[in-house]
Amino acid sequence: MKHLLVLLLLLTVGTLSAEIAPEEYRGMQLNAFEHLEIKVLSVSKSYNLFSGNTKVKANAEVRTVIRSESNLTVGDRITIRYTHDKPRKFWAGPRSIPILEKKEETTAFLAFDTENLVYVPAARGASFEPLIIEY
């Protein structure tokens, strides 16, 4: 019984730290309400000393609209908020959402947070990457 519990614990821990398959990221990108090309105008970061995570607030200008549920148009300015999780040692889990940089031009897969009136990443670590190609 003791060996069975240890085996179950090891299997559970292994699944908790597994990387997400590229097809899953692609699915999240395809299901995102907003698919845009943006230019980052400003970025503010708030670092949490204990967790090592960083809260990010970016202001961006919409350069191209591929798809928009919230009716964004070219030239609109948006605010994006999210948390960048610091990768842990020996952690093979989902990719962290990268920290955007000022003047960066990038693809963005987003959703509108109606409670906080900001946009949030919709495809986890692939939210600011080009659409993943299907093989």
Image (spheres, rainbow, N blue to C red):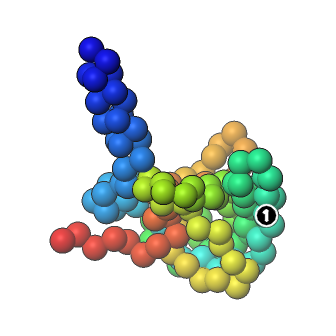
Q: Is residue 113 left or right of residue 131?
A: right
Residue 4 x %, y %:
26, 22
* Residue type indicated by callout 1: Lys
Query: Is 6 in front, or is 30?
Result: 6
Q: Residue at x 34, y 71 (%)?
A: 132
Q: Residue at x 34, y 35 (%)?
A: 10
Q: Residue at x 27, y 14 (%)?
A: 1
Residue 77 x %, y %:
71, 70
Residue 75 appearing in the image: no
Corner quadrant of residue 53: bottom right
> Can you say which quadrant of the picture contains the C terminus?
bottom left
Residue 50 x %, y %:
77, 47
Residue 36 x %, y %:
52, 71
- The secondary structure type at the circle numbered 1 is strand
Residue ID for mark 1: 45
Q: Is residue 105 above or below residue 86?
A: below
Residue 45 appearing in the image: yes
Q: Is residue 20 left or right of residue 107?
A: left
Name the residue at the front extreme: 2
Mark 1, Cα crowd under 10 Å, few <14 / some 14-19 / many 20+, is some
Q: Is residue 122 left or right of residue 118?
A: left
